[in-house]
Structures are given as structure tokens and as C-alpha cells.
Image: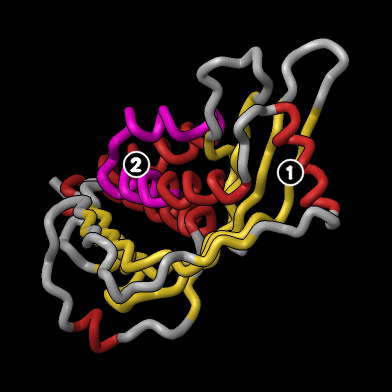
Amino acid sequence: MSALSHIPYDIIVFALISLVLAWRLRHILGRRVGVESMAALQQRTPQPVATVAQEPLAATEPEAKLDVPSPGTRVGQILAQISTVQPGFQPEGFLRNARTAFRDIVTAFALGERDKLRALLTDSAYNSFVAAIDAREAAHEEQRTEIVGINSLSIVDAMLNQPAAGVPQAAIEVQIVSRQISILNDIESQPLVGTESVTEFSDLWRFESLVGSNVPGAKWRLAAARAA
């Protein structure tokens, strides 16, 4: 029997698919700002599969800056319209909820928690995230993510669609700047994507929701994301 017959082609294919999806999700979840520490990579200690370390916010760590456009701007006027259609909507409160959603989504993706992602994402975004998780698991890769801190959240765009017949729909785009340790290891615990160093990520996340007093239970979900 030839040596070629012993090559695990299925594992190789899964690894290639996972690597491509990881690269695409890295553009969804953010991009690195700074230079990787090669010394840190060389000294890396193998980690358990898909671990997420989230320490409680230290008392000395500043609260994330929340930036809301002024009422006189185009985006500020749209936010005011959303407040009129959706009783109780407040931009600052929305950003606080977006901060929580950011932590929950990044954590759930690293841990492969599909049920949690289902509750936080639109169908399209959910399918993209789950495809990456499936490929990662098929290739026996491990994702390690630690959210060190969230620097700021800024509303950069908003949209309100009010059809003549039907339920109004709103969308808000938020720029999120965070500090993370994010690394994807292969089946042999060797790094494929990311670094052990604390890295700054800048993301644009678009949240969507049905709005109006006649839409009980409607919630904001992540619909799209890209690197800022």
C-alpha cells in the first residue's frame, strides 16, 4: 500500500475550511492594531479547547466611554425618531446593552455555544458564526479568547424604516473598541490565527430590531459586523 493512502485527506480539508472561515470571522469580529509578539507565541502554553477568560472589571479600570451623536446631527435625529416610535428607548441604555451583547457574543463564539448565539444574532449572522464553529470543531481546533476590556462604544449610524403597512424596523451601527487576547490553535496546539499579546480590536457592529408599542418581546440582535 502506498504512503499516499495513509494521508488523512478529510482532516486536511476540514483544517483548510476552518482556517478560511476563521480568517473571515476575524474580519467580522475585528482587526488587530499593533504588532504581534513573537516571543510570546514561542513561549505559549497549550490551553484547553475553546476557553474564555473574563475577569470581573477591576475597580481601577475606567468605564467604557459611551458616545451618542448630538440631537442636531442626522444620526441624532434618527435616534430621536426611534425614541418616538419605541417607548423607553434611550441611546445610552442601548449602548450599555450593546456592550453586554458584545461580551456575550464573543464569548459564545469562542465556546461554541450555538443556543446563546441564536438568541443574540439574526438568522444570517447566526449562520455565518455557526459555519465557522462547525469547521473549527471538525478540524479539532481550539479558540482561546480573553476580553481584557472595552474602551468605547460609539453610535455611528442609524436607520428607521416605517412602511405604510407593517411593523417599523430600526438599525443602529456601533463602533466598538476593545482589548482582547484572541488566538486559534490547530490540532497540535500550534497558533493559526491571533497572538498571545493583548490586542486592540476596532469593530463596526450593526444591530437590528422591530420597533413599536405593538411589538412585544422584540429585541436588538446583531445583524452584521465588520472591521472598522
Decide which of 123, 152 is in the foreground and name it.
152
At 53% from the left and 53% from the top, the residue drawn is 28
At 56% from the left and 61% from the top, the residue drawn is 66
Q: Which residue is mark 1?
A: 79
Amino acid under disc 2: Ile
> Reading the chain from its start, which is encountered first: label 1 or label 2?
1
Residue 118 lies in the magenta stretch: yes
**Residue 224 as seen in the image, left or right of residue 106:** right
Q: Nearer the viewer, mark 1 or mark 2?
A: 1
Decide which of 175, 86 is in the foreground and name it.
86
Q: Position of residue 212 (x, y in %)?
A: 68, 21
Instruction: Categorize mark 1 by other alpha carbons within 10 Å: few (<14), some (14-19), many (20+).
Output: many
How far is disc 1 from disc 2 in space, using C-alphas? Answer: 35 Å
- Whether residue 206 is visible here, answered yes or no, is yes
Question: What segment is highlighted magenta in the picture?
Answer: 102-124
Rendered image quadrant of residue 109:
top left
- Whether residue 4 is visible here, answered yes or no, is no
